[in-house]
Amino acid sequence: MLTFPFSWRRSLAQDGALLGRLTRIFEETVHTFYVERAAKDGKSGANTGSVTVVQRTSSDLRLNPHLHLVALDGAYHEQGADLAWQALGHLKTSEVGEVLKRTVRRMEKQLRRRGLLVEDDGTDPDAEGGGDPESNLAASAVRGSR
């Protein structure tokens, strides 16, 4: 599950295209991670897949756009004329952190392009994590998987 900082939520609730773009960024980042991981195992040209559900509220119906992503834990690659499955095992905590870091960078870039992420002294008293966007997203993003 990936949740967004409070300071982003109103914009994401009001702008479906923006929420869709950030969803694609998250999916693409996860897919890229698995493809790169498969390439390290000598399986270049691999592909993977996922299913993402966008949920716009929390269970108490408060505004809380967030993403539920279920990803294949591996990648398919061509092996002769066939497709072969390469299981890549469970992610390490450091790998989850790297995917999150890449995701945050790409999302921040998208928000800056749209003028929705203002760079100032780095503090926002209303934001989680003291206003640093990466800390805010990291603080709100990673929930234990079940």
Image (tube, rainbow, N blue to C red):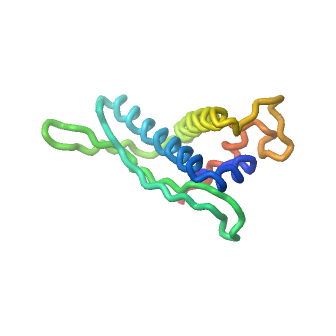
Where residue 30 sits: x, y (%)?
A: 47, 42
Near-viewer residue (83 or 21): 21
Q: Is residue 139 visible?
A: yes
Q: Residue at x 66, y 33 (%)?
A: 112
Query: Looking at the image, which residue sits at the far bottom?
Result: 60
- Residue 43, placed above or below residue 14: above
Q: Residue at x 69, y 69 (%)?
A: 61
Query: Looking at the image, which residue sits at the far left?
Result: 81
Q: Quadrant of residue 77?
A: top left
Where residue 101 sits: x, y (%)?
A: 60, 35
Where residue 56 sits: x, y (%)?
A: 62, 61
Q: Quadrant of residue 93?
A: top right
Near-viewer residue (141 or 121): 121
The quadrant the N terminus occupies is bottom right
Q: Is residue 140 visible?
A: no
Q: Residue at x 13, y 39 (%)?
A: 81
How many callouts does the rendering have? 0
Near-viewer residue (59 or 110): 110
Near-viewer residue (89 or 117): 117
Left or right of 79 on screen, residue 146: right
Q: Residue at x 30, y 30 (%)?
A: 44
Where residue 60 sits: x, y (%)?
A: 70, 70
